[in-house]
Image (spheres, rainbow, N blue to C red):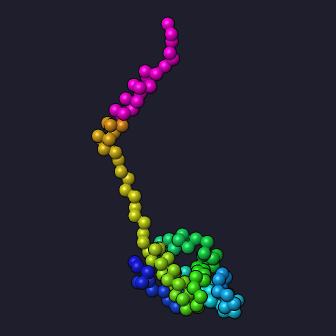
Amino acid sequence: MRPEEVQIPDDALSETFLAATGPGGQNVNKVATAVQLRVDLFRLGLHPDVYERLKQIAGSRVTGAGELLITARRFRTQEANRADARARLAEMVAAAHIAPRKRKPTRPSRAAKAERVEKKRQRSAVKQTRGKVTFD
C-alpha cells in the first residue's frame, strides 16, 4: 500500500497549533505555525496486526490513551506543516500495512556438509603437527 492510497477519517484527527522553535525571526514569536496532529488509533479501524505494527513503528509517539502524536514544524506556514504531518501519518500507516516476510528455515546441502567436515579435518591435521619442540 502506498501513502497516497491511505484513507484516514477526519473524525480520528485533531490538530493544535503551537509556536514553532528555530529560525524565523520575529515571526516565530508571533505566529503559531507548528502543528501537533493527534490521531485516535482506534478510530482508524485497522486490522489488529496492522495496529500492532503501527504502534511498533510509532514507538514513543503513541500515548497511553492510544493516540499517536505527530509534531510538524519543518516549514514556516501552518498549511505546509499540516500537509507534512498528514503525509508522515500516511507513510506510517502505509508502512504498517506491509507484513514482514516469514523466514523459511534452510538446511546446508550434503556437499556443503562434506566440505565443512573436510576443512575441519585439514585444520585438525595442521594443529596435530604443532607441539612442543624438543632439541634432542
Is residue 11 at all visible to an observer of this figure?
A: no
Q: Magenta span has 130?
A: yes
Judged from this view, the residue extending furthest toward the top is 136
Please state the horizontal and vertical placement of residue 12, each as a whole percent of the image: 55, 87
34 displayed left or right of 123: right
Residue closer to the observer: 131 or 22: 22
Please state the horizontal and vertical placement of residue 28, each as a whole percent of the image: 67, 88
Tell me where the magenta segment starts and ends, as one range.
117-136
Residue closer to the observer: 86 or 97: 86
Q: Residue at x 44, y 81 (%)?
A: 3
Residue closer to the observer: 94 or 80: 80
Q: Main secondary structure of the magenta part?
A: helix
Q: Residue at x 50, y 71 (%)?
A: 53
24 displayed left or right of 136: right
Which of the 4 image quarters holds residue 104? bottom left
Which of the 4 image quarters holds residue 124? top left
Q: Residue at x 44, y 25 (%)?
A: 127
Q: Residue at x 45, y 86 (%)?
A: 7
The quadrant of the image that shows the N terminus is bottom left
Is residue 75 at all visible to an observer of this figure?
A: yes
Judged from this view, the residue extending furthest toward the left is 111
Relative to 53, does residue 124 appear above or below in the rendering?
A: above
Give the mark count: 0
25 displayed left or right of 40: right
Please state the horizontal and vertical placement of residue 135, each as a whole percent of the image: 51, 10
Which of the 4 image quarters holds residue 25? bottom right
